[in-house]
Amino acid sequence: SYELTQPPSVSVSPGQTARITCSGDALPKQYAYWYQQKPGQAPVLVIYKDSERPSGIPERFSGSSSGTTVTLTISGVQAEDEADYYCQSADSSGLGFGTGTKVTVL
Amino acid sequence: EVQLVESGGGLVQPGGSLRLSCAASGFTFSSYWMSWVRQAPGKGLEWVANIKQDGSEKYYVDSVKGRFTISRDNAKNSLYLQMNSLRAEDTAVYYCARGASSPPSGYYYYYMDVWGKGTTVTVSS
């Protein structure tokens, strides 16, 4: 099973930087991925393989990894970034999601 | 346009069955792993199952093993989830998602780069 722990909520003012952490013992051995989900919508991939950004995702989204913790950073937060964010990891037998973090733009 | 469209959700009694479908378009369906992910009301995302390109490998979360079966028909560009012995805790929005996975050799990775809008399953008497 996967235990990926995220803070329940993060609040940030427009233009500031939001950092969302995801912790798990397996993370040093596995890549992490991040999804954004707005109310009533399907998740959208925003970071893959720890720090890669899919095409169409703004440059203000970035990812990093250090030991058992990975971090999603949103630089210059905009009102449209208010959403739930989930980390995800996987091995050859399955995958798991983090507990989710609600980002509120003040 | 790459698209996934789920169907088949609805209201079912505990112990009942339901079959979800996912129609894929805009990409070579047979070249990709596929996944089902669910989200209970007000809760987080939960992975349900994965299936390999040719259907030869399938993986499930422990809570659905023996009750759910993932399958695909590459000729019809379709993914399925047969759900039996349904429980109240299976109530959720079920998403179909395209998997991006590593080749057989090399460092393992798996993530979902395209998602459908979801179909709602409610298990209640």
Image: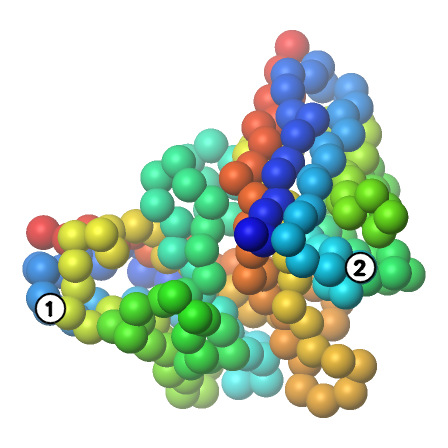
Provide residue A23's location: percent of width, then percent of height.
43, 72
Provide residue B1's location: percent of width, then percent of height.
56, 52
Chain containing the residue with disc 2: B
| Left or right: A31 in relation to B86 | left
Which quadrant is the N terminus of chain A positioned in? bottom right
Q: Identify the amino acid type marked 1.
A: Gln
Question: Is disc 1 on the same chain as disc 2?
Answer: no
| Left or right: B56 in relation to B1 | right
Q: Secondary structure at mark 1?
A: loop
Q: Is residue B81 above or below residue A78?
A: above
The residue sitting at the right extreme is B56
Disc 2 to disc 1, C-alpha distance: 43 Å
| Left or right: A70 in relation to B98 | left
Provide residue A75's location: percent of width, then percent of height.
20, 73
Q: Identify the amino acid type marked 2.
A: Ser
The residue sitting at the top extreme is B125
